[in-house]
Image (cartoon, rainbow, N blue to C red):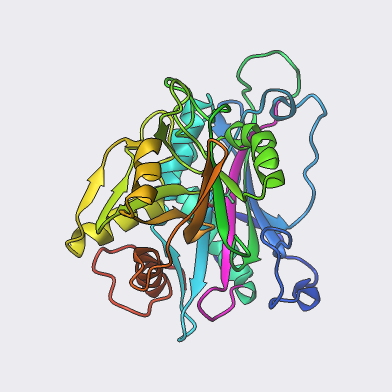
Amino acid sequence: MESTVKNLHIEKAKSSKIGQVDFSNLSFGSVFTDHMFSCDFKDGMWKTPKITPYQPLLLEPSARVFHYGQAVFEGMKAYRDDQDGVWLFRPDENFKRINKSSVRLAMPEFPEEYFFEGLKTLLQLDQDWIKPGIGNTLYIRPFVIATQAGILASPADEFKFVIICSPAQAYYGGEVRVKIAEKFSRAADGGFGFAKAAGNYAGQFYPTKLAQEEGYQQIIWTDANTHEYIEEAGTMNIFVRLDDKLITCPVGDRILDGVTRKSVIALAEDQGIEMEIRPIKVKELVEGMENKRLKELFGSGTAAVINPIRGFGYQGKRYELPQMADSYANRFKKQLLDIQYNCTDDKFGWRYRVM
Ligand code: COI
């Protein structure tokens, strides 16, 4: 296979595992394609990028990633349309964000040409894993880890950039109910909540496990200082519909600048939906339930796309949202999927053809 990145080294898998995969029964992120892309950073530069069969990484036990969590990642998807074309959705945003995350974690930025050529070549090699049909996707996980051996608590100077791919369908299997955080926090001002840093996710697991024991699937994080304002749900940004107005909180130090979030905002504004980007008080949700002005809550994210939130828990009380016939969540989900699967015009220029 030819690649325009002159020194991209390709070693093909001897055989494919695809025959062993039940594509009608996938559990998110548990099966990986035949190949992976990787590139090492050493002596102040990114070395020859390569595509190899998907395989374990060989790392020193003292590699910094294991001790200090110097690691960032991204989430993207490839979609196959009904004429066999393969597309990405706003991949430039993921590229910019992984580098922004890397800078915050004292890691080197990855070159744009390597990212796009590596990704396209990988997708070409593993194209049979991208199945047609709305809802079938190939989830793409680029990540960067500190590989340098030695447990000195300081930034590493050796890293590995990797892309692995996993066929995926829905992220959340059933209905989603969330607990609003009253005690634990996800991020603080001046911290790295905006980055897709591994540690941001690890820190959520314990509180989320406690919430799951109470029957919730996720937590809506609130501001660390007062717990009065909602922030994000960890795997999703949050939208609130009060009457017919759509509200989401501003991103900043603490909140991930979601690609799906900014796409929903653009769609809403384009359709003349009243849109407010401002801090949202938990109190507004509770009052909105009492006076019936709270019509919808939904989350947005690459893995989750748009996920309606059926209910929330706060201060020991459970609230169930009404079921809306003309739901914004359904409307935006359909509009996004239509763009992603090349079923409609792409007036925003968000689609990126891979093949
Ligand atoms: C994504 O939506 O791609 C995410 O990063 C969420 C993930 C942790 C599954």
The correct choice, above or below, for 320 with respect to 124 in the image is above
Q: Residue at x 48, y 41 (%)?
A: 98
Membership of 238 in magenta stretch: no
Instruction: Classify residue 138 by image quadrant.
Output: bottom right
Quarter of the image where the N terminus is located: bottom right
Q: Residue at x 43, y 55 (%)?
A: 298
Q: Is residue 276 left or right of residue 135?
A: left
Residue 279, position as x, y percentages in the image: 31, 35
Q: Identify the magenta region.
A: 130-148
Residue 81, position as x, y percentages in the image: 46, 80
The correct choice, above or below, for 304 with respect to 105 in the image is below
In this rendering, the count of numbered labels is: 0
Q: Quick one: 235 or 179, which is closer to the camera?
A: 179
The correct choice, above or below, for 2 with respect to 266 in the image is below
Q: Quick one: 148 or 6, which is closer to the camera?
A: 148
Membership of 141 in magenta stretch: yes
Please say whether residue 153 is visible from this viewpoint. yes
The correct choice, above or below, for 292 with respect to 326 in the image is above
Q: Residue furthest left?
A: 272
Q: Residue furthest bottom?
A: 83
Q: Residue at x 51, y 54 (%)?
A: 311
Residue 114, position as x, y percentages in the image: 50, 49
Q: Is residue 167 left or right of residue 4?
A: right
Residue 148, position as x, y percentages in the image: 70, 26
Q: Residue at x 69, y 76 (%)?
A: 23
Q: Is residue 63 left or right of residue 342?
A: right
Q: Is residue 54 left or right of residue 225?
A: right
Q: Residue furthest front?
A: 290
Q: Quick one: 129 or 10, which is closer to the camera?
A: 129
